[in-house]
Amino acid sequence: MHFITVYGVTANMGETGIQVYFDNYSPIGDITVMATCIFIVALVFTSYVKKSKSFKIFLNLIVYLFLAAATNVFYHNMYAGITDGNYRWVYILRCAFHAFLFSNLLLYIVYIVELQRLELAKKVPVMIISVILYFFAIAVDIFTTVSGKGFKLTKNGRAVNGVDVFFWGYISFIIIIAFLMLVNRKRLYKQVMLGFYATMIISFVLLFIQGIVGNNSYTVVSFMFPVLAMLYLVHSNPYDIELGAIDAKALEDLVSYNYEKKRSMIFFSLYLPDFDEEGKQFTKEIQTAIRRFASEYFKAGVLFQVSSGHIILMAEKRRNPDYENRVNKIINAFNVEKEKFGYDFKIVLGETVDEVSRRKEYVSFIRIIQDHIDMNTIHMVEYEDIERFNNYEYVLSELEDIYRKKDLRDTRVMAYCQPVYNIQTKKYDTAEALMRLKLPDIGMVYPDKFIGLAEANGYIHVLTQIILQKTCDEIKNLLKKGYDFKRISVNVSVLEMRDEKFTSDIEQIIDASGIPEEKVAIELTESQSESDFELMKDIIDSLKGKGVKFYLDDFGTGFSNMERIMGLPFDIIKFDRSLVIASDSDERAEKMVSSLANMFAELDYSVLYEGVENESDEERCIRMSASYLQGYKYSKPIPMIELSRFFSKKE
Ligand code: C2E
Ligand code: CA
Ligand code: CA
């Protein structure tokens, strides 16, 4: 197997006195490796790379690679320069060189094991075998060298080769690595796997050729290939080339890395809603302005692109110590930019907060703040923001739990309701179900704090099913006790109607309760999209066939596309409170609302006014063709079990 007798070295002084290497060794390869290592380390410290555990192993690899290359250069130089036959240092350096390469091989294994996230039971035996192999290989290498059974130099500088410990050690490590990669191949992303294989094969071929030629100038270079592949395949960041921004996940990693290091950071978040749609991009001018702004006002700032219209700049506080004094300057500078572009914006500015860093939730923290501030304002983070965030996180986790458990009688979801006054019968004979959450840590939570959240996270349909279940339970109870009422309505979100199972889920709950379908109504709001309209039509048609009634909610707040509204067989049109308020302003406004209501009444829709708070509202609404009235004038929302106070019994 002498073809990989990589170290069949012979060197001496040439006749001209110029140093030559008898084994044709050229330091070029090793010097290139050293330069590359320094370059990579410099890159790492001047740009952002996620400092994961595997990345730290990677940095160690770079260090050992550098040491191996340096030792190899020294070893060859030393060898070529010795004339007195005392090769002690040559032997020592040669063993050290091998030890550094073995360290590299061991680190490859540690690295691969880390990437594959092996469980302890699989990890421990591999590591034990590798560490034993590592020490064994180094010990044997030293032993064979000392005892003269391995590599040896004669007095006149000729190499005599005995056992090639490095070769056998190298082969053993490669077998372990190949084994790890093959057995756990499913654990690595395919592209990464292929990349590793390719570089390993290249390294192997290079060593092979070296062996044949009897040259070892490129041994360390061959170790370099897998390292470069790792840097590219595993540790490169998904950059937005044009903006130079990194994606949002990296933001959380950066903050949490600095948090562990007890370093505060500052952030500057810019949201431009005009660009925040899928497929949209900042214009070239905005990109340039952002880049310039980021580098002029923040030292060592890193830009992250959260969504197409939202970027966040993060910078270490200690590198921007005067940032608080400069806030006004920053704001002024921004205002100049803003004047130039004239887009709507929201800015959030502040320092990292331990509670948020720990949870890696900056993007949602900033989004929550953003939701609460007005358009075209600049907001400095304050204590209330953190409190709101904590609540939000808690509500979200409870919602998730409710969703997961899917208990239709979950006690955390409370069915409240508001009785509705019927003008014709002068009685309360319908009501609207309204949801509240009652959570262990913070008590009652109102819809404005959780409906949007539940919708955004896909939990709303389960909540609707729970409210429907509780409403059906109460309807059943009221009927059993002999109460006379028409129905109770339940609010449904447009989003959940897109769920294929929507109709059957609703039917199933009503059917299982054994109540007549016409005792249940569903309140829907108008949607802008044509496909939602078609969907709504199908759903209404199929459920109406069974007797369920439909209300159009919040009329007057949206787009009020009359043609579409008329295309859907609603039973009741709910005029939003804003129309009740508007009709109070002057006669013209009242006429307008009144004629809208008239039109609906003539087309056989019933009109319900929401938010009737006093006598004057009531009188006006009655003048404006009302059939039903709902509002604080009659009752605030009450727990559903108290509804019997409003309903009357059959005569
Ligand atoms: P909405 O469907 O328009 O419900 C009417 C809201 O107006 C209720 O607020 C009610 O308490 C309030 N309100 C009633 N009378 C008056 C009044 O005289 N004056 C004023 N200023 N307000 C009045 P709530 O309970 O906070 O619910 C807010 C919104 O949350 C609801 O608006 C609805 O869109 C949503 N929501 C409530 N429960 C559910 C539910 O079970 N499912 C879904 N998807 N949404 C729900
Ligand atoms: Ca409603
Ligand atoms: Ca409403």
Image: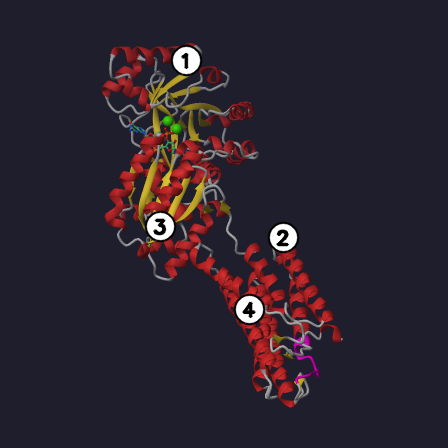
Residue 414 in view (yes/no): no
Element carrying mark 3: loop
Residue contact between numbered discs 1 and 4, judged by CB atoms under 8 Å:
no
* Mark 4 or mark 2: whose residue is earlier in sequence: 4
Q: Which residue is at the front of the view, 156 or 292?
A: 156
Q: Residues within 10 Å of mark 3 (few under 14, many from 20)?
A: few
Q: Looking at this rendering, what residue extends furthest in the front direction?
A: 16
Element carrying mark 4: helix
Compute the Cα span from label 4 to label 2.
25 Å
Residue contact between numbered discs 1 and 3, judged by CB atoms under 8 Å:
no
* Mark 1 or mark 3: whose residue is earlier in sequence: 3
Q: Nearer the viewer, mark 2 or mark 1?
A: 2
**Which dot marks residue 440?**
3
**Which dot marks residue 600?**
1
Residue 248 in view (yes/no): yes
Q: Which residue is at the front of the view, 183 or 59?
A: 59
Residue contact between numbered discs 2 and 1, judged by CB atoms under 8 Å:
no
**Which dot marks residue 65?**
4
Rendered view: 144 above or below 297: below
Q: Position of residue 462 (x, y in %)?
A: 48, 40
Q: Residues within 10 Å of mark 4 (few under 14, many from 20)?
A: many
Element carrying mark 2: helix
Q: Looking at this rendering, what residue extends furthest in the right direction?
A: 1
Rendered view: 117 above or below 332: below
Give the amino acid type for the residue marked by disc 3 in the picture. Pro
**Magenta span:** 157-169
Residue occupying image coordinates x 45% and y 39%: 456
* Mark 2 or mark 3: whose residue is earlier in sequence: 2
Compute the Cα span from label 2 to label 3.
47 Å
Q: Which residue corresponds to mark 2?
A: 191
